[in-house]
Amino acid sequence: MYDMMERKFANPEEVFADIKDGSVIASSGFNRAMAPEYLLEKLYDHYRETGHPKHLFFEFETTTGMPGIGTDKVAKQIYESGDTEFIDGMLIPFTGFSPWSAKLIQENIVEGYMWAIGVAANWFREVAAGRPGLLTKVGLGIFMDPRDPDFQGGLMNERARSRRRANVSLVHIDGEEYLLYRAPQPDVAFIRGTTSDEQGNISVEEEGAVTSVLSIAQAAKVRHRGTVIAQVKRITKCCSRPAKSIEVPGPLVDYVIKAPREVQWQTGSYEYHPAISGEDYIPDLNEILMESAKNMSPIEYVIARRAAIELTDLMTKYGRTLVINLGIGIPVYTSIVLNQEGLQNYVIGTVEPGAWGGVSLAGNDFGVAISPSALIRMPDQFANYEGSIIDAAVLGFMQVDPAGNVNASYLPGSVFTGPGGFPVIARGAPNLIFAGRFTAGKTDEYIRDGRIFVNRTDSEKIKFVRKIALKVFSASEAMKQGQNVTYITERGVFRLTSDGLLLTEVAPGIDIDRDILGMMEYEVRISDDLREMDPAIFDISSRMNLRSRVISEVTENVPINGE
């Protein structure tokens, strides 16, 4: 027995020599959180030295690493060397943190398949249970739908369309449409934890997320007993960790590899912060919020303030706290506004990998939160989104068409970033707020005396276009489900109706014909009850007194600012 346990702890070269050519490798990781980047980089080093294993197919729950690290580092080396035998293809929900992977896909060097993060996370869980794939309504009417003329179910290039290794099929049950997602069962699983004991029990006490590591390990084990390799920071005595802290039981783990600390960071900016892993709690988060606010322009601040008003109205409507999700970019700034207004205890933010509460971090730290109140597994988190358990979501957008369909992932001439968690959240949120600048590119806009002024520039790029480049949100599906959908910009606010977009509010100082209608590729209906956006939004030196709107309406049992 001792020898068997001892064999679990090996160096990478010994372990990787057993991985066969053509293997399917699943990997955990939400950007750098829970990313076994050391395993991935060492596997590629082993290939360069020995020529094996090769012709691999990778299945990522999100992305393993960040720019220059993990997946991206390996993809860059493959691209620059021209040696493409290491990898044949990848199923990857998000390449925003791996631009070199995006290049491999976009230039048709490897097969590229893209599903939403929540689809991938729950697919691992379904495979682990021995089921044929994931059955869901997520993806209907967007690029992941097999009826989409361009991407046919997330097939992102010609190699993928030829091989069709990851398939999406249309299924009818009791007259309703669903999608069935299928892909090869993994032969090998790369996962990460903080600590392994001598039996290979893996705990995650210093991680900023749990993600889908258990499901990924199980998916490799079902039926054909594949290989599970865990990257950890430390190894300790047998059974020294509390049983409830174990995320992956030792019998599911074949090998444990201790990684150097420099490749075991919680996020892009933090090697280790106890308030990210929930081991400590910072009651006053203003300093962190103000640090995030440094990157926010006045125009972005205005948009976030209007989004905060939308959430405030929902609080008064429901008379209780809200559970929400905030997307990357401007939506994250909404949390800053809510904290400034003293409403942070009325809005519980959630992040895709599993954090509830606290302050969600942005940029290379996206996916974790400072001082979360709870950390759950990623498949469970996405159940909150897909099942409409959350109350609202604030998401960004790149393009909007006349019907209200949204592209948030790709513009012609740029690289595919993948859908991320967007399709699941956008489909499930009963109240959906798209928040972003009215145009892209360089725009000369400024705020003065509570009004917004727009000067024309040649580099403005229209975002309200006749045809979007990639559909990641379906307006028709939203109407079927009865979702309340709002589009907030600095110039005006639109609502989704059965007849498409309706302009309901205009910012003070904005000329509708010149600054809104003249910068859209299509005509839009204007509400008979067109209103001016609340002038308080544009008085950016002052608070908007949103707390006074809520305090008399929301349940008295909910504390404000800890009172």
Image (spheres, helix red, strand yellow):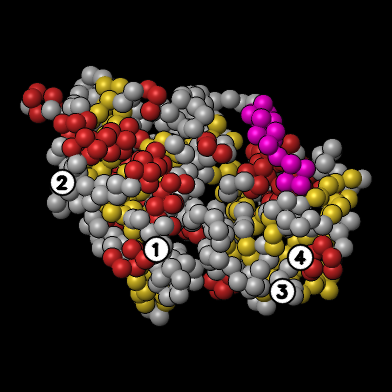
Residue type indicated by callout 1: Asn
7 or 364, nearer to the observer: 364
**Element carrying mark 3:** loop
> In this orientation, does residue 356 appear?
no
**Element carrying mark 2:** loop
Q: Measure the C-alpha gap from mark 3 to mark 4.
A: 9 Å
**Element carrying mark 1:** loop
Q: Is residue 471 left or right of residue 519?
A: left
153 or 493, nearer to the observer: 153
Q: What secondary structure characterizes most of the magenta part?
A: helix
**Quarter occupied by residue 426:** bottom right
Give the residue furthest to the bottom: 175
Q: Measure the C-alpha gap from mark 2 to mark 3.
A: 54 Å
Residue type indicated by callout 2: Lys
Disc nearer the start of the sequence (2/4):
2
Q: Measure the C-alpha gap from mark 2 to mark 4.
A: 55 Å
For the magenta stretch, what is the residue range?
Answer: 285-300
Please give the label number shown on residue 519: 4
Say which quadrant the C terminus sits in: top right
Q: Measure the C-alpha gap from mark 2 to mark 1.
A: 26 Å
Please give the label number shown on residue 522: 3
Please give the label number shown on residue 157: 1
Please give the label number shown on residue 20: 2
Q: Is residue 466 left or right of residue 151?
A: right
> In this orientation, does residue 311 appear?
yes
Mark nearer the viewer, 3 or 1: 1
Residue type indicated by callout 4: Met
**Quarter occupied by residue 172:** bottom left
Disc nearer the start of the sequence (2/1):
2
Residue type indicated by callout 3: Tyr
Residue 221 position, x and y percent, is: 19, 47
Residue 551 position, x and y percent, is: 75, 43
